[in-house]
Amino acid sequence: MFNIIKMDFYRMFKTVSFWVSLIVAVGISMFTSFIANLFEMPDMSAAYLIIQAFSSSDVLIICTIFISIFVHAESKNGFIKNIAGQVKPRSKLILPKLLILISYIIILPLVYFLFSILTFILVGNNIIFDFSIDIFMTIAVEFLLYFAFGSIIIMLCIISNSSALSIAVGIMMSARIFSIIYAAIDFVVSKINPGSTFTSFKYSLISNMQYVANMNDDSTVRAIFVGIAFAAAAIAISVLSIQKKDIK
Amino acid sequence: MEYLLTTSSLTKQYGKQLAVNHVDMHIKKGDIYGLIGRNGAGKTTILKMISGLAKPTQGSYSFYSDNESLSQCRIGTLIEAPGVYQNFSAKENIKLKCIAAGIKDKNEVNRLIELVGLQNAGSKKVKKFSLVMKQRLGIALALVGNPELMILDEPINGLDPQGIVEIRSIIEKLNKENGITFIISSHILEELSKIATRYGIIEKGTMIKELSVDELSNEGSERIVLMTDNNPKAIEILTQMNISKFKAVDEKEIHIFERFQDTGDITMELALNGVKTIQIYLNNDDLENYYLKLTGGNKNV
């Protein structure tokens, strides 16, 4: 198991898409920071910037694309045939992917954040490092939601044996296109139970990323449960799928 | 007899389709086992099950009668196309497998690269490799961890004659010098017959025959076909000539399984004893003909 983890990390740092994704993140971070500089206050909060890095849909889309390419590459190139027979149970192949995901969702927002700071400094802004326990808590919950999001991307790659579905779904989630579905669910619920105040949107990963970014205490607890539920379900489905399916 | 690998009633069903049907295979240590069958016969599915890439619907397999999971890491596989990252070099691909196998010897990558003759292309990206170079790399990947058993699925498919010779010589070398046992599936029966020591013939998911090269020979693949006007008399004469390995197929035809160089002597002896030879010829049936006879198929294996 430890060897497979080492192998996946070796592969991640050797993969061109890893470095390209970071360069794209740097470019977007610097560009948006430069544009924001034209409209915002000369004093910029570092806490605000790091929370922005975690809740930005650009970062989510980059994460979606890299994780999809990375996870799917193993079966697309057939390299999995070299190792899958020797790893028992085969579900052990999931853990290294989750560790890659964790590493990536630390590195990517951090790079985005650092280059944001750098851009603001370069254009003459004053950065206020206003971190507090609450900010770290918010970052931790955002991280959990990010992990759940990435777990869904991994799950889609594994069950569909393709990167197309995971990229499409990931981008649609990031672009909040699924809000139409939530509205439809709410409409059906209100028809069944006219007095209901149920809002399905509150239980989606992306909406919780936004709620948590606004640092609302009520939403934080709910976001933790939503994050854990989505991550647990996605990992369970991935494990069952890789265990049951034959390697093609 | 102690076998390196045996399968017992190995079965694979996809929906209603029975891809592999209760297959029993017996592979001895040191064998080059040729798995023969037409497209869709179930060869790849069998190899995938033995490699741990597909789960049998029914039946089992074992190595040295041990627990299969203990021995799985001693198998090297090259199933269908080589599983390699196209944007990585040959060395990087092998290094990945070495890391996964827990091999710490830094010389292992170079040793394997040299073993398969890729020393001049080790740092080249795999996407620039020719088909035979990719096959060589696939074999190198299968060799990571010093396997006792190598499973190669159609390793010479699509290769040019030079490539076929190269891959064959690598297999022979590994079998003779490293004592590696091979299971090889191939459509190209003529090539397979040059290296295989045992055969398993698969038809519609069922193992219809397992036999060694000697048994193939004894099955009567090579024989003198003799037709005379007086077979009882001809049999007497053959016995007098100390020919014992023969079979009277019918009233007109006798098959002789020895002294293949002596057709002239046989004809002369028959003539001297008043037996007229209607026809005599050496029938050198090869593996392909034997396969076709057994399966009742056409030449499109």
Image (tube, rainbow, N blue to C red):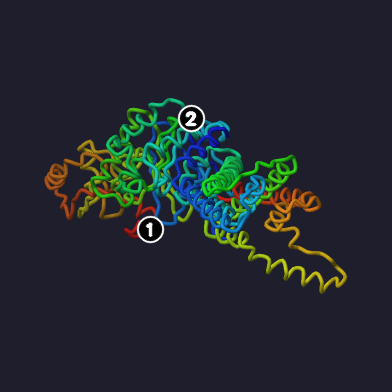
Q: Residue at x 47, y 48 (%)?
A: A23
On whether disc 1 and disc 2 are found on a single subunit, the reply is yes
Give the residue number, with chain letter if any, for mark 2.
B2
As rendered, which of A203 and B245 lies closer to the eye? A203
Name the residue rendered at 28%, 43% in the picture.
B246
In this view, the residue farthest toward the bottom is A191
Residue nearest the observer in this picture, B267 or A197: A197
Q: Chain of mark 2?
A: B
Query: Local crowd at mark 1 within 10 Å, few (<14), some, or many (≥20)?
Result: few
Amino acid identity at mark 1: Gly
State how far apart marks 1 and 2 are (Cα): 33 Å
Q: Quadrant of residue A214?
A: bottom right
On the image, numbered disc 1 is attached to which residue?
B296
Instruction: Left or right? Give the position of A194 relative to B89.
Output: right
Judging from the image, mark 1 belongs to the subunit labelled B
Numbered marks: total: 2
Is B73 displayed left or right of A49 in the figure?
A: left
Q: Position of residue A94 (x, y in %)?
A: 60, 43
Evaluate whether residue B35 shows in this view. Answer: no
Relative to A197, A22 lies left or right: left
Q: Secondary structure at mark 1?
A: loop
At 82% from the left and 71% from the top, the residue drawn is A190
Mark 2 belongs to which amino acid? Answer: Glu
| Sequence-first disc among 1 and 2 | 2
